Image (tube, rainbow, N blue to C red):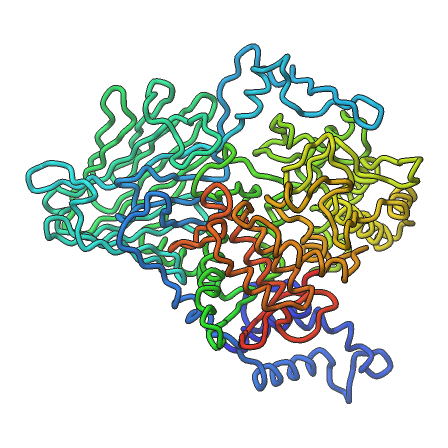
């Protein structure tokens, strides 16, 4: 990128101003638009004139001169990314390479396709529901009446009197596999090759361009496969070079499964029930075709386009496996697009798709923040930087789309492929802190989409405002579950996101975008607490599932993290009322003034008020105590008590029984406590629950577990960019770490 253009973009981002695409002149004009009102004081008589020169023109010349003379990129971003290029020599059956655009992704084995392992092809629109029988009509589900605060509340528990309905709601909708595309490799004797027949296998993932190049030999003949994904279309392009093409020994196949009923599915789909779905081949012309798919009420198209002549052999009876036989002289390209809506689409050629893909990835890497650890004295810098770079790659490829992502992104299905509202924080916040807020916009728009149905849920339960779900899909329909019905720490999330977006763009437009969501969320939060006339305080009472999900819901009351988050949420919502020119809301204020304090025992904070034997019985799962002054800015937190609590967690917690994002949460707490050495140690903690494999896919939950990747990026952004009240450059990193940064935003 030209140095002037880079400097202009960096300047606009420092002013938290939207950065347009376009020329350097357009960028300068955008900066002028932002800064000009502040320069009017320099004009003569308020006329915007200085010594007879037009003020805008003067400022233009000044900006160009200053930026050209003094501004330059701090980091060679391409070098940082390139040194972590992924190279593998064999298929890991649990960890595929990928190409994707954030909404759609294709997973592959060592051949560059899904030749030997039935990896998944997943999209954010790919949802399916099994046909409902008469007993499973969703409108019949009533919920289960539970005594809450002296009244009966219908909670979304599994209903023993409606087991079929409860089970159907639990498993539907679910994400499904769009289909499998692989190579059919024939040996000289006509037999199909197996993976052990391949020699000299090597696969490279070029992170800078998003292309995967796979090479291998079959009986001494070289095969090269280049795989890319279109940045806009749910489509992949494959270019194969080999003399095997001329001999008719290299072909393709496509196979399609029926959705399975597994809540956790590594290879999604059932290939053993061909009679339950339809795959119909329709010819579009000599160089293209369409396979029309119907799975119960779900329909989609798979459109194919190729470079040379090719014959498509339809499946035999009892199968959905198509054979694609190219007639080529050594180089053949195949494009495959998956479409939720029927209709024609013009696919780019392979050459154009590669250019589009490379440009999209280059723009991504040059946008937002960056970090370079290579000058650090600590030898661990390279592993931490590798995790950072690969996590950025994976999150962009798997988690930029219409809906919040599931825990396993677009790699595997976890919890039926549904997304978790409490985990949106870990999936999306890093985009805002890395100055890539535009990549989170669609996902966090789920709060606007689900506001009407979430209001209805709260009303049904007798509360004001909006009750956000816990786990759902492309429609706001909760999964009947004891945890889902009683978990509450997802409730303040939209207030946190609203505040982050407003800090980035403090405009009336942003106030209008979020105010209804913020106010409805706060209304529910203030109504959900119960007033205890004996202790004369508001309590967060049972039944309640806290962050760790490991305490009895009917005994848990006044959990520390939830209390701290409630205080943050209501106080921030009051700030929003003042920004909107409204008086502070009385009910919110009453709750704030009389909310129960954070529970303390023996000089440290405890998980919830009255918890028995906490440090021996409940010292596993999420140590959410760390979040009250790590994830959160610490309203109402005694810093001395918190420091002692952090020490207690680090020495007493069962770190073999935690989740991946727990380490990032603890690192953020250590950073706020001015313990940067501990922060770095925690991001590199040697645990089976926080490993990052060759592809960057992380452990810490159902594998792969993307909250581990998102948590890492969030913690790094905080440690590099700082937080409100922090001083110095990169305050979360210790001495000996020479950290170069660009573009990070301060955390709250």
Q: Position of residue 149 (x, y in %)?
A: 83, 28
Q: Residue furthest left?
A: 189
- Identify the residue shown where x is 66% and y is 34%: 469
Residue 248 location (% of width, % of height): 12, 41
Residue drawn at x 30%, y 26% is 320
Q: Name the residue nearer the viewer: 384 or 74.
A: 384
> Could you say where residue 111 lies in the image, as x and y percent from the top left?
26, 48
Q: Residue at x 26, y 55 (%)?
A: 89
394 or 148: which is nearer to us? 148
Which of the 4 quarters of the picture holds residue 153?
top right
* Image side of residue 652 versus residue 88, left or right: right
In the visual, does 722 lie left or right of 91?
A: right
The image position of residue 285, as x and y in percent, is 28, 36
Residue situated in front as seen by the camera: 610 or 444: 610
In the displayed structure image, the side of residue 163 where residue 52 appears, left or right: right
Instruction: Tell me the quarter of the image containing the C terminus.
Output: bottom right
């Amino acid at each position: 990128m030209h140095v002037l253009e880079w400097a202009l973009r960096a300047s606009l981002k420092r002013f938290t101003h939207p950065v347009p695409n376009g020329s350097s002149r357009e960028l300068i004009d955008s900066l002028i638009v932002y800064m000009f009102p502040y320069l009017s004081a320099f004009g003569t008589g308020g006329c915007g004139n200085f010594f007879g020169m037009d003020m805008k023109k003067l400022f233009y010349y000044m900006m160009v001169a200053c930026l050209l003379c003094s501004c330059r990129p701090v980091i060679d971003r391409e070098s940082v990314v390139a040194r972590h290029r992924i190279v593998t020599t064999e298929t890991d059956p649990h960890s595929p390479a990928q190409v994707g655009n954030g909404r759609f992704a294709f997973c592959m084995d060592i051949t560059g396709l899904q030749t030997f392992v039935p990896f998944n092809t997943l999209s954010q629109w790919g949802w399916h529901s099994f046909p409902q029988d008469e007993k499973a009509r969703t409108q019949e589900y009533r919920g289960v009446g539970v005594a809450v605060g002296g009244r009966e509340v219908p909670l979304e528990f599994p209903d023993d009197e409606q087991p079929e309905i409860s089970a159907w709601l639990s498993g539907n909708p679910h994400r499904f596999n769009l289909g499998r595309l692989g190579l059919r490799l024939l040996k000289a004797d006509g037999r199909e090759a197996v993976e052990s027949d391949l020699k000299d296998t090597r696969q490279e993932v070029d992170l800078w361009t998003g292309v995967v190049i796979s090479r291998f030999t079959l009986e001494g003949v070289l095969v090269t496969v280049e795989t890319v994904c279109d940045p806009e279309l749910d489509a992949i392009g494959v270019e194969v070079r080999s003399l095997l093409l001329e001999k008719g020994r290299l072909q393709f196949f496509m196979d399609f499964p029926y959705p399975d009923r597994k809540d956790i599915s590594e290879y999604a789909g059932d290939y053993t029930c061909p009679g339950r779905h339809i795959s119909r081949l329709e010819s579009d012309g000599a160089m293209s075709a369409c396979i029309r798919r119907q799975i119960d009420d779900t329909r989609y198209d798979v459109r194919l386009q190729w470079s040379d002549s090719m014959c498509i052999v339809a499946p035999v009876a009892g199968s959905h496996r198509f054979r694609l036989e190219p007639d080529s002289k050594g180089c053949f390209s195949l494009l495959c697009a998956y479409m939720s809506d029927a209709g024609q689409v013009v696919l780019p050629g392979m050459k154009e798709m590669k250019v589009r893909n490379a440009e999209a990835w280059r723009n991504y890497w040059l946008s937002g923040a960056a970090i370079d650890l290579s000058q650090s004295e600590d030898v661990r810098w390279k592993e931490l930087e590798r995790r950072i770079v690969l996590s950025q790659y994976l999150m962009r490829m798997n988690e930029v789309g219409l809906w919040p992502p599931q825990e396993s992104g677009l790699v595997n299905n976890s919890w039926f492929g549904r997304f978790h509202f409490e985990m949106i924080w870990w999936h999306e916040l890093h985009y805002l802190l890395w100055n890539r807020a535009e990549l989170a916009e669609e996902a966090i728009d789920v709060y606007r989409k689900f506001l009407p149905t979430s209001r209805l849920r709260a009303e049904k339960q007798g509360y004001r405002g909006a009750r956000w779900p816990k786990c759902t899909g492309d429609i706001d329909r909760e999964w009947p579950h004891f945890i889902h019905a009683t978990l509450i720490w997802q409730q303040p999330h939209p207030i946190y996101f609203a505040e982050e977006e407003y800090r980035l763009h403090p405009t009336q437009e942003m106030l209008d975008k979020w105010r209804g969501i913020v106010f409805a969320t706060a209304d529910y939060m203030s109504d959900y607490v119960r007033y205890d006339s004996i202790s004369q305080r508001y309590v967060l009472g049972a039944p309640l599932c806290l962050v760790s999900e490991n305490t009895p819901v009917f005994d848990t009351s006044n959990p520390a993290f939830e209390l701290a988050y409630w205080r943050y949420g209501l106080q921030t919502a009051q700030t929003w009322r003042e920004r909107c020119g409204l008086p502070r809301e009385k009910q919110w204020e009453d709750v704030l003034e009389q909310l129960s304090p954070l529970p303390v025992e023996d000089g440290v904070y405890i998980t919830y008020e009255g918890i028995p034997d906490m440090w021996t019985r409940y010292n596993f799962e999420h140590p959410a105590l760390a979040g009250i002054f790590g994830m959160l800015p610490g309203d109402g937190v005694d810093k001395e008590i918190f420091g002692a609590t952090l020490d207690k967690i680090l020495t007493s917690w069962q770190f073999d029984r935690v989740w991946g994002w727990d380490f990032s949460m603890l690192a953020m707490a250590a950073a706020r406590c001015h313990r940067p050495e501990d922060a770095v140690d925690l991001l590199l903690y040697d645990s089976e629950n926080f490993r990052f494999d060759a592809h960057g896919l992380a452990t810490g939950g159902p594998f792969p577990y993307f909250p581990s990747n998102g948590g890492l990026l969030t913690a790094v952004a905080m440690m590099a960019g700082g937080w409100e009240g922090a001083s110095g450059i990169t305050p979360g990193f210790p001495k000996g770490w020479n950290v170069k940064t660009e573009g990070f935003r301060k955390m709250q």
